[in-house]
Image: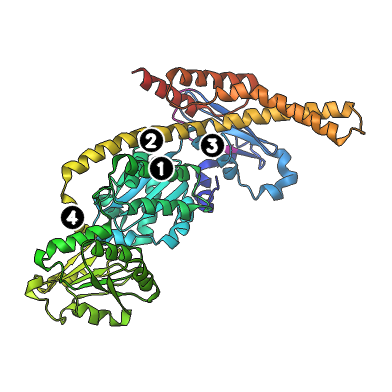
């Protein structure tokens, strides 16, 4: 894991304490000896880790009084390599060693979010991060002291940041402060509207989001596409690591499975569809066929609005867009419908001739304010006498001030709640079916995360076996002389590798743990203890031990 310069600078004094500060060591202290102050770990058991870095030796242990004893670090022999060692500070060595206290605690998956359920659109639009800025946001988040991995899910209905945090509370504090800094919203205000979820709850949440259970419109498919986009954008981005990447990929699988097995999307709609339904709810029923429709923006959301209008029987509409290419493509795709293109320069004139205006552009400034609407000609009483603005953009394209006019009404994404009020009983039934799938998939994901805990032990054991194999192979080849044919040399090498692999196969299988069998979990713990004792692997196993014991207790209840 990379260590940011901010971490090195801010935390150096707290972690590295010179022996000269101790009166008891003042007489014997030398520039080559530094004391390391490590915080006590959570386990009651006394744990020690011995790590060799260059020629120095780091030792951290928990004293009986729960305070960490300060040990000397012998760096006397490192003087000859001081130039190269200067590029790796003592703190960075701690961050990459088993002596670091954070390796003794399993990192947490945390989601810090604000959604349509918890925060108003005014706040969400300030926090929104454009897709093009996601890689930069991930990089900045992973530069925070206690954040290892990160991902951003920013849509019109939610702004959620997923992180793998070395420390829950410190990670949340740092991410919240980062959100405040980037949005200009005070930390106190963000805290008032945010929600926090950890580990299993965070996993369950993103699975619900991907399945469409957390959307205004149950089962809507657009959110699944947005989760897929998080993975697509995150590929190759430093910080979109194994845990977060695995979480979002599993969420995509869950979203697909829920929709296939529960048919939850049947009768459900996307935000664009809900916008159309809301507009039709507000119009007199006998005016649906005659109301003049205007769609501003021909992107993904605008295209969906057009499709849903057509599905509701609309045969003529005006589409305002920056260029005609997208409108022409939509016209080619949707036959037997009159789609009239107009450039942005004619937007005001088009609004004057429309009864319902849908806006879905990426503009960061409002397209319509009170002064733009006040002088528009009135709408026919047969259409309801009100010009409807249905704004599904974040940031909003239509200012709330337009509602002050007696001749117009504005609806934004927060108003779509009216559309999803129907068929509540059916939605709950499908949601219960989906929850059963999500619970099952959550267990599978947790088992996958559990399997990652054994990776250090497996790597240590393989490295130990490889060292022995290489050494014995060299001895054998040296005895056979220098004129060994390449074919023979390769055969001997392959033979040694085959023997090692077959010998390791059994131990490796017994290090696997899927969380479904208490006997297997208990044996895994015993096997890891045995391997550690037999081969002196020096692997930090306390977290895995605690985790497996907890699971055994759960399965025995």
Mark 4 or mark 3, which has the lower sequence index? 3
Of callouts 1 and 2, the N-terminal one? 1
User: Does dot 3 land on a helix, a strand or a loop?
Assistant: loop
Residue 407 coordinates in the image, percent (x, y): 11, 74
Q: Residue at x 23, y 82 (%)?
A: 349
Q: CA distance from mark 1 to mark 3?
A: 35 Å
Residue at position x 85%, y 29% in the image = 477
Badge 4: residue crowd in 10 Å (few <14, some 14–19, many ≥20): some
Pointers 1 and 2 in contact (CB under 8 A)? yes
Disc on res. 441: 2
Element under disc 2: helix
Look at mark 3 in the image and give the residue it sits on. Answer: 100
Q: Are marks 1 and 3 in contact (CB under 8 Å)?
A: no
Q: Point out the frontmost of discs 3 and 2.
A: 2
Which residue appears at 47% of the width and 34% of the height?
Answer: 448
Residue 277 sits in quarter: bottom left
Q: Give the SS element for disc 1.
A: helix
Q: Which residues are magenta?
A: 35-45
**Residue under circle 1?**
253
In terms of secondary structure, what is the magenta stretch mainly? loop
**Labels 3 & 2 near each other (Cβ < 8 A):** no
Which residue is tagged 4? 419
Give the spatial CA distance, label 2 vs label 4. 30 Å
């Amino acid at each position: 894991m990379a260590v940011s310069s901010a971490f090195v600078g801010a935390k150096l004094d707290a972690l590295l304490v010179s022996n000269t500060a101790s009166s008891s060591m003042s007489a014997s202290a030398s520039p080559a000896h530094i004391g390391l102050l490590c915080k006590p770990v959570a386990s009651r058991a006394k744990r020690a880790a011995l790590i060799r870095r260059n020629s120095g030796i780091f030792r951290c242990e928990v004293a009986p009084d729960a305070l960490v004893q300060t040990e000397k670090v012998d760096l006397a022999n490192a003087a000859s390599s001081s130039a190269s060692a200067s590029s790796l500070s003592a703190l960075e060595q701690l961050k990459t060693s088993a002596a670091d206290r954070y390796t003794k605690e399993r990192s947490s998956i945390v989601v810090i979010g604000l959604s349509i359920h918890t925060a108003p659109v005014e706040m969400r639009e300030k926090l929104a991060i454009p897709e093009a800025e996601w890689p930069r946001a991930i990089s900045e988040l992973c530069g925070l002291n206690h954040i290892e991995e990160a991902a951003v899910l920013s849509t019109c209905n939610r702004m959620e940041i997923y992180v793998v945090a070395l420390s829950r509370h410190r990670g949340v504090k740092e991410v919240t402060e980062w959100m405040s800094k980037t949005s200009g919203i005070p930390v106190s205000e963000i805290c008032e509207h945010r929600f926090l979820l950890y580990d299993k709850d965070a996993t369950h949440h993103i699975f619900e989001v991907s399945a469409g259970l957390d959307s205004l419109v149950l089962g809507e498919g657009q959110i699944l596409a947005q989760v897929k986009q998080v993975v697509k954008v995150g590929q190759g981005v430093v910080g979109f690591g194994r845990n977060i990447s695995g979480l979002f990929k599993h969420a995509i699988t869950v979203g697909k499975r829920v929709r296939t097995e529960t048919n939850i999307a049947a009768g459900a709609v996307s935000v664009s569809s809900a916008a159309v339904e809301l507009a039709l709810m507000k119009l007199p029923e006998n005016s649906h066929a005659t109301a003049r429709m205007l769609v501003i923006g021909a992107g993904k959301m605008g295209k969906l609005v057009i499709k849903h209008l057509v599905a509701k029987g609309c045969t003529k509409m005006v589409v305002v867009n920056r260029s005609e290419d997208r409108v022409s493509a939509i016209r080619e795709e949707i036959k037997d419908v009159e789609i009239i293109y107009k450039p942005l320069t004619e937007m005001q004139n088009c609004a004057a001739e429309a009864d319902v205006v849908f806006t879905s552009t990426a503009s960061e400034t409002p397209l319509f304010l009170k002064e733009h609407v006040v002088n528009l000609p009135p709408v026919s009483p047969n259409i309801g006498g009100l010009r409807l603005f249905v704004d599904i953009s974040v940031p909003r394209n239509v200012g709330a001030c337009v509602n002050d006019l007696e001749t117009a009404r504005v609806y934004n994404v927060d108003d779509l709640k009216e559309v999803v009020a129907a068929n509540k009983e059916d939605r709950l039934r499908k949601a219960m079916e989906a929850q059963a799938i999500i619970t099952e998939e959550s267990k599978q994901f947790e088992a996958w995360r559990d399997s990652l805990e054994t990776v250090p032990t497996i790597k240590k054991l393989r490295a130990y076996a490889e060292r022995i194999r290489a050494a014995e192979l060299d001895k054998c080849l040296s005895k056979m002389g220098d004129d060994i044919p390449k074919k023979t040399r390769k055969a001997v090498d392959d033979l040694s590798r085959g023997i090692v692999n077959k010998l390791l196969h059994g131990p490796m299988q017994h290090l696997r743990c899927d969380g479904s069998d208490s006997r297997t979990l208990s044996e895994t713990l015993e096997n890891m203890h045995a391997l550690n004792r037999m081969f002196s692997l020096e692997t930090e196993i306390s977290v895995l031990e605690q985790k497996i014991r907890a699971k055994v207790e759960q399965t025995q209840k």
